[in-house]
Amino acid sequence: MDFDACSQKSRDKIIKCYQNGKEFKINNKTGRFVNKVEVDGCLINDENEEKCDYLFEIDNPMSFVYYVELKGKKLQKACDQLGNTIKLCKQRHHNIDKECHIISSRVPKAGTSPQVLKRQFLKVYKVQLFIHTRTHTVTI
Protein backbone atom coordinates (compact mmCIF):
# COMPACT_ATOMS: atom_id res chain seq x y z
CA MET A 1 0.00 0.00 0.00
CA ASP A 2 1.43 3.34 -1.08
CA PHE A 3 0.51 5.73 1.73
CA ASP A 4 2.52 8.63 0.29
CA ALA A 5 0.69 8.59 -3.05
CA CYS A 6 -2.70 8.76 -1.30
CA SER A 7 -1.82 11.32 1.39
CA GLN A 8 -2.33 15.01 1.95
CA LYS A 9 -0.01 16.23 4.69
CA SER A 10 -1.12 19.38 6.47
CA ARG A 11 -0.92 21.57 9.54
CA ASP A 12 -4.06 23.50 8.57
CA LYS A 13 -6.45 24.64 11.30
CA ILE A 14 -9.38 22.75 9.70
CA ILE A 15 -8.96 19.42 7.89
CA LYS A 16 -11.99 17.58 6.59
CA CYS A 17 -13.45 14.96 4.33
CA TYR A 18 -16.96 14.97 2.95
CA GLN A 19 -19.18 12.97 0.64
CA ASN A 20 -22.89 13.21 -0.23
CA GLY A 21 -23.74 15.63 2.57
CA LYS A 22 -21.72 13.81 5.26
CA GLU A 23 -18.64 15.44 6.79
CA PHE A 24 -15.87 14.60 9.25
CA LYS A 25 -13.78 17.55 10.39
CA ILE A 26 -10.64 17.92 12.47
CA ASN A 27 -10.27 21.19 14.36
CA ASN A 28 -6.47 21.48 14.50
CA LYS A 29 -6.10 24.58 16.70
CA THR A 30 -2.43 24.06 17.51
CA GLY A 31 -1.27 23.18 13.99
CA ARG A 32 -0.34 19.56 14.63
CA PHE A 33 0.82 17.42 11.72
CA VAL A 34 -2.09 15.57 10.09
CA ASN A 35 -1.74 13.06 7.28
CA LYS A 36 -5.12 12.67 5.53
CA VAL A 37 -5.17 9.39 3.57
CA GLU A 38 -7.76 8.58 0.92
CA VAL A 39 -8.32 4.88 1.46
CA ASP A 40 -11.20 3.93 -0.85
CA GLY A 41 -10.11 4.28 -4.47
CA CYS A 42 -6.46 5.11 -3.77
CA LEU A 43 -4.71 3.32 -0.89
CA ILE A 44 -6.91 0.25 -1.44
CA ASN A 45 -8.10 0.00 -5.05
CA ASP A 46 -9.45 -3.55 -4.96
CA GLU A 47 -13.25 -3.34 -5.36
CA ASN A 48 -13.62 -6.73 -3.64
CA GLU A 49 -11.79 -5.54 -0.52
CA GLU A 50 -13.85 -3.81 2.16
CA LYS A 51 -12.30 -0.52 3.24
CA CYS A 52 -13.24 2.75 4.87
CA ASP A 53 -13.21 6.08 3.04
CA TYR A 54 -10.43 7.97 4.86
CA LEU A 55 -7.98 7.76 7.69
CA PHE A 56 -6.16 10.54 9.47
CA GLU A 57 -2.74 9.96 11.03
CA ILE A 58 -1.95 12.51 13.73
CA ASP A 59 1.58 13.78 14.50
CA ASN A 60 4.96 12.75 13.17
CA PRO A 61 5.94 10.34 14.61
CA MET A 62 2.36 9.12 14.59
CA SER A 63 0.50 9.19 17.92
CA PHE A 64 -3.14 8.61 16.89
CA VAL A 65 -5.27 7.43 13.95
CA TYR A 66 -8.88 8.25 13.05
CA TYR A 67 -10.58 5.83 10.65
CA VAL A 68 -13.62 7.39 8.95
CA GLU A 69 -16.49 5.87 6.97
CA LEU A 70 -19.01 8.24 5.35
CA LYS A 71 -22.11 6.07 4.96
CA GLY A 72 -25.76 6.18 4.06
CA LYS A 73 -27.55 4.08 6.67
CA LYS A 74 -25.95 0.61 6.44
CA LEU A 75 -24.15 0.66 9.77
CA GLN A 76 -23.15 -3.02 9.80
CA LYS A 77 -21.45 -2.63 6.40
CA ALA A 78 -19.66 0.49 7.66
CA CYS A 79 -18.40 -1.50 10.68
CA ASP A 80 -17.13 -4.25 8.38
CA GLN A 81 -15.33 -1.70 6.20
CA LEU A 82 -13.68 -0.02 9.19
CA GLY A 83 -12.70 -3.35 10.74
CA ASN A 84 -11.12 -4.63 7.56
CA THR A 85 -9.16 -1.39 7.11
CA ILE A 86 -7.81 -1.75 10.65
CA LYS A 87 -6.63 -5.28 9.76
CA LEU A 88 -5.04 -4.13 6.49
CA CYS A 89 -3.18 -1.28 8.26
CA LYS A 90 -2.25 -3.37 11.29
CA GLN A 91 1.48 -3.30 10.66
CA ARG A 92 1.67 0.47 10.09
CA HIS A 93 -0.66 1.35 12.98
CA HIS A 94 0.59 -1.27 15.47
CA ASN A 95 0.65 0.16 19.02
CA ILE A 96 -0.96 3.44 17.86
CA ASP A 97 -4.15 4.64 19.59
CA LYS A 98 -7.17 4.60 17.26
CA GLU A 99 -10.80 5.67 16.95
CA CYS A 100 -13.35 4.80 14.30
CA HIS A 101 -16.10 7.16 13.18
CA ILE A 102 -19.12 6.41 11.05
CA ILE A 103 -20.82 9.51 9.67
CA SER A 104 -24.25 8.32 8.61
CA SER A 105 -27.01 10.09 6.71
CA ARG A 106 -29.35 8.71 9.34
CA VAL A 107 -29.33 5.99 11.95
CA PRO A 108 -31.77 3.27 10.87
CA LYS A 109 -34.63 2.31 13.16
CA ALA A 110 -34.52 -1.37 12.15
CA GLY A 111 -31.62 -3.79 12.47
CA THR A 112 -28.85 -4.01 15.03
CA SER A 113 -28.79 -1.05 17.37
CA PRO A 114 -25.84 1.36 17.29
CA GLN A 115 -25.06 0.52 20.94
CA VAL A 116 -24.76 -3.19 20.15
CA LEU A 117 -22.55 -2.47 17.12
CA LYS A 118 -20.26 -0.29 19.27
CA ARG A 119 -19.89 -3.01 21.91
CA GLN A 120 -19.22 -5.70 19.30
CA PHE A 121 -16.69 -3.52 17.50
CA LEU A 122 -14.78 -2.76 20.70
CA LYS A 123 -14.74 -6.45 21.63
CA VAL A 124 -13.47 -7.61 18.23
CA TYR A 125 -11.06 -4.81 17.22
CA LYS A 126 -10.22 -3.22 20.60
CA VAL A 127 -11.05 0.17 19.07
CA GLN A 128 -13.74 2.64 20.14
CA LEU A 129 -16.47 3.17 17.52
CA PHE A 130 -18.51 6.37 17.29
CA ILE A 131 -21.62 6.80 15.14
CA HIS A 132 -22.74 10.30 14.14
CA THR A 133 -25.48 11.72 11.94
CA ARG A 134 -24.44 13.96 9.00
CA THR A 135 -21.39 15.67 10.55
CA HIS A 136 -18.85 15.41 13.33
CA THR A 137 -15.88 17.48 14.48
CA VAL A 138 -12.97 16.31 16.63
CA THR A 139 -10.48 18.69 18.19
CA ILE A 140 -6.83 17.74 18.43
Image (cartoon, grey):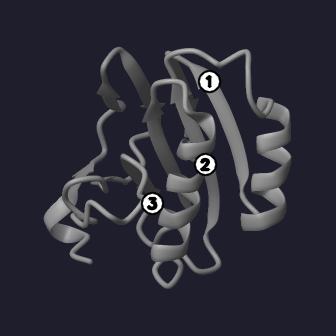
Helix, strand or loop at mark 1 = strand
Percent position of residue 98, x then y: 63, 58
Q: Which residue is mark 2?
A: 79
Q: Residue drawn 57% across and 15% down?
A: 106
Q: Earlier in the sequence, mark 3 or mark 2?
A: 3
Position of residue 89 relative to residue 71, above or below, is below
Q: Earlier in the sequence, mark 3 or mark 1?
A: 3
Q: In the drawing, does residue 33 fall left or right of residue 84?
A: left
- Residue projecting furthest to the left: 5
Check the picture and name the quadrant holding the N terminus: bottom left
Helix, strand or loop at mark 2 = helix
Quick one: label 1, few (<14), some, or many (20+) residues within 10 Å? some
Residues at marks 3 and 1 touching, judged by CB atoms closer than 8 Å = no
- Residue in the foreground of this view, choosing between 9 and 86: 86
Q: What amino acid is found at the position of numbered circle 3 in the picture?
A: Asp
Quarter of the image where one finds residue 51: bottom left
- Residue in the foreground of this view, choosing between 93 and 53: 53
Residues at marks 1 and 2 touching, judged by CB atoms closer than 8 Å = no
The disc placed on residue 59 is 3
